Amino acid sequence: MACGFGSGLSPWAPGTFGTLFAWASFALLRPLLGDGELFGLIVVCFVGGVLAVHRTGVDLGVIDHGSIVWDEIVPFWLVLLLCPAHWLWQTTAFCLFRFFDISKPQPARYFDEQVKNGFGVMCDDLVAAAYTLLVLAILRWGLA
């Protein structure tokens, strides 16, 4: 699970492949679940992810090993849940999320550098999701 059902095993850009997996799996889940059910699933997957990511990091000897991408998947599901369903908005969300995940603006950097456990690994991407949603909201407001 922590390795995104294999999507994190890519030798090139595993975080990007994990986020692409999130996008594809969200497209499969979206027609089956309402907003509340999806949000509940995201919360459960976040809490379970804290445990799974931590255990996998300990087992691999690196708490935020590159192959661990569950921390990309769950926060990007949240972005997609709150993002307009149009492909252009979702593509913009994907690019923004990858930018914020890679650049790690504060407080994401704090979680990445100081909180060396599953919670820290999951939270730095949750911050990237929050920045993504903020920029999308500003774009939407500006285009209204």
Image (cartoon, rainbow, N blue to C red):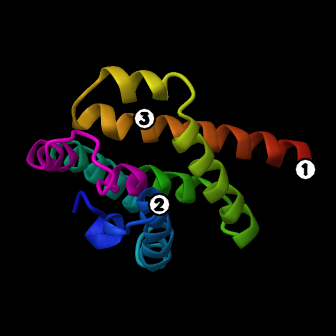
Q: Residue at point 21% right, 41% down?
A: 62
Q: Give the CA distance from mark 3 to mark 1.
A: 29 Å
Q: Nearer the viewer, residue 3 or 119?
A: 3
- Relative placement, left or right, of 112 versus 101 is left
Please indicate, yes or no, whether residue 144 appears anywhere in the rendered image. no
Dot in front, 3 or 2: 2
Q: Residues within 10 Å of mark 2 (few under 14, many from 20)?
A: few
Magenta-colored stretch includes residue 80: no
Which amino acid lies under the numbered mark 2 shown in the image of this protein? Ala
Q: Position of residue 66 (x, y in %)?
A: 33, 52
Q: Secondary structure at mark 2?
A: loop
Residue pointed to by mark 1: 143
**Where the N terminus falls, by quadrant?**
bottom left
Q: Give the CA distance from mark 1 to mark 2.
A: 32 Å
Q: Is residue 132 above or below residue 114?
A: below
Q: Nearer the viewer, residue 34 or 29?
A: 29
Contact between marks 3 and 2 (CB within 8 A): the answer is no
Residue pointed to by mark 3: 124
Classified by dominant secondary structure, the portion drawn in magenta counts as helix
Q: Give the CA distance from mark 3 to mark 2.
A: 17 Å
Segment colored magenta: 52-74
Quadrant of res 29: bottom left
Which amino acid lies under the numbered mark 1 shown in the image of this protein? Leu
Q: Secondary structure at mark 3?
A: helix
Circle on res. 28: none
Circle on res. 13: 2
Which tag, 3 or 2, sits closer to the chain's start? Answer: 2
Quadrant of res 51: top left
